[in-house]
Image (tube, grey):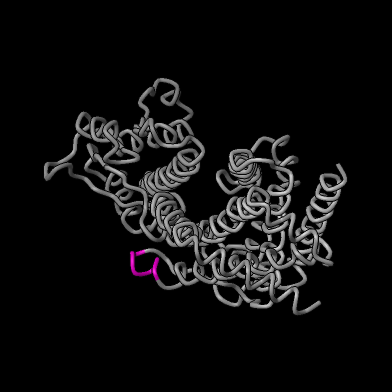
């Protein structure tokens, strides 16, 4: 029995090596996908600390409000601030044009006399409070800070950015109001001990700290590499269904499968040779993709792939994914009757499963109905498992449910292949 299995494995290896073009596609295609998709999506996944949001700043105020907003923006990693465009000082018109052309994501225009207007309003408030006058009702001056937004930018991203900017600007306005109020009170109450203390100036009431929820021993920052390397590796492993199904159909068309059936060897033993060979191909694909993410992408200025805490978890999940992909290929080759059927059935089904599985579009941005359907895609099981390992710092116990699902999928595919092959032989 072992000799028969080894002979089948040897046959499959020789057939695979003869098709050098197809073999090279199996390895070069996923490398190209990872490089292209990672480079394209890198800016979308970069954290704010790495690059910052391009902002053009126009300070028509030339007073406390304008200066403090600019200093605050310059001191934070949230934004990359520029007050000039093409070497010339920015103004309202040039800033609007630059943002509309995509040179900047956001433009901030501080109006002339903004600080003076705030102080005037505060003076009116103090006068009304101390003298009981109606000067506040007569005061109509207001400060309008213009925020210019690139219309091409995604709304959800801009909402997060502009809300932070509005909060920051409001904080500075409150600080100026408090200072002005303190000065007005000090004029009325000369005793310094009775002057309100500007504790706001010394400390910030609310602070923010961003922490990525992960149990990894080293900090894992979500980026294009962490998302794309596992995603397109899984896609490439399932894409192996096409050459595997073609191999099965080639044996049918050449008549060799009928000669194999005359041998006193069960069908599953004959097909096991194909499974072992193509599982090995999937493992080589995975190792190559890891090498690309770990060593090649950093040479292109991208972050290196972080593997997480559990190498055993990676091995188990990779093996389960390889068997699931190979079992799917065997089923496609068994059910198809021509090369064209196998190519169309294999490619379209893989594209559909990858789209549903979150390879092309993350599942968390899908509608609820599609998210529920996505949970039935084997590519989604594998991808979620690798996210557990690469992004959340999970271990073997975290990916076992996904690995079990993938192995159940493999045995289900093999059962379907066995029944379909048995039915064809009895017709």
Q: Residue at x 59, y 50 (%)?
A: 242
Q: Residue at x 71, y 63 (%)?
A: 323
Q: Quadrant of the C terminus?
A: top right
Residue sitting at the far left: 88
Q: Which percent across, then down, holds residue 240?
A: 59, 56
Q: Is residue 23 above or below residue 246?
A: below
Q: Which percent across, then down, holds residue 405?
A: 79, 58
* Residue 409 part of the magenta-drawn span: no
Q: Which percent across, then down, holds residue 162?
A: 44, 40
From the viewer's perspective, tell me whether residue 56 is left or right of residue 239. left
User: Would residue 48 be visible to someone looking at this image?
Assistant: no
Q: Nearer the viewer, residue 71 or 190?
A: 71
Tell me which corner region of the image, top left, top right, bottom left or bottom right, holds residue 316.
bottom right
Q: Is residue 256 above or below residue 332?
A: below
Q: Which percent across, then down, holds residue 324?
A: 71, 58
Q: Nearer the viewer, residue 147 or 212?
A: 212
Q: Nearer the viewer, residue 292 or 155?
A: 292
Figure label count: 0
Q: Which region shows up in magenta?
A: 296-301
């Amino acid at each position: 029995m072992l000799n028969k299995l080894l002979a089948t494995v040897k046959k499959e290896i020789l057939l695979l090596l003869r098709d050098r073009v197809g073999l090279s596609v199996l390895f070069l295609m996923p490398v190209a996908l990872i490089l292209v998709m990672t480079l394209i999506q890198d800016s979308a996944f970069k954290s704010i600390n790495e690059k910052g949001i391009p902002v053009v700043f126009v300070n028509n105020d030339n007073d406390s409000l304008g200066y403090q907003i600019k200093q605050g923006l310059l001191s934070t990693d949230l934004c990359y601030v520029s007050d000039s465009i093409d070497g010339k000082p920015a103004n309202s018109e040039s800033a609007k044009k630059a943002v509309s052309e995509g040179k900047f994501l956001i433009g901030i225009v501080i109006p002339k006399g903004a600080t003076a207007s705030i102080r005037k309003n505060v003076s009116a408030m103090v006068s009304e409070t101390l003298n009981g006058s109606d000067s506040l009702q007569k005061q109509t001056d207001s400060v309008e800070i213009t925020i210019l937004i690139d219309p091409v930018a995604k709304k959800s991203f801009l909402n997060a950015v502009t809300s932070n900017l509005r909060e920051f600007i409001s904080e500075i306005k409150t600080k100026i109001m408090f200072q002005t109020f303190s000065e007005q009170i000090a004029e009325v109450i000369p005793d310094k001990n009775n002057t309100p203390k500007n504790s706001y100036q010394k400390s910030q009431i609310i602070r923010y700290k961003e922490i990525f929820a992960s149990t990894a021993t080293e900090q894992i920052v979500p980026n294009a590499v962490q998302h794309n390397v596992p995603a397109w590796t899984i896609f490439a492993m399932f894409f192996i269904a096409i050459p595997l199904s073609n191999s099965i159909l080639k044996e049918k068309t050449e008549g060799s499968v009928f000669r194999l059936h005359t041998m006193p060897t069960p069908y599953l033993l004959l097909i096991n040779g194909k499974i072992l060979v193509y599982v090995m191909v999937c493992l080589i694909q995975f190792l190559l993709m890891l090498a690309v993410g770990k060593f090649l992408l950093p040479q292109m200025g991208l972050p290196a792939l972080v593997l997480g805490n559990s190498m055993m978890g990676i091995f188990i999940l990779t093996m389960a994914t390889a068997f699931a992909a190979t079992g799917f290929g065997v089923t496609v080759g068994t059910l198809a009757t021509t090369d064209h059927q196998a190519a169309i059935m294999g490619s379209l089904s893989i594209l559909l499963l990858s789209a549903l599985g979150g390879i092309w579009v993350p599942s968390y941005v899908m509608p609820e109905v599609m998210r529920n359907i996505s949970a039935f895609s084997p590519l989604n099981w594998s991808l979620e498992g690798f996210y557990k390992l690469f992004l959340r710092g999970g271990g073997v116990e975290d990916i076992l449910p996904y690995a079990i699902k993938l192995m159940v999928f493999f045995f289900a595919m093999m059962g379907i292949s066995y029944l379909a092959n048995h039915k064809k032989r009895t017709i």
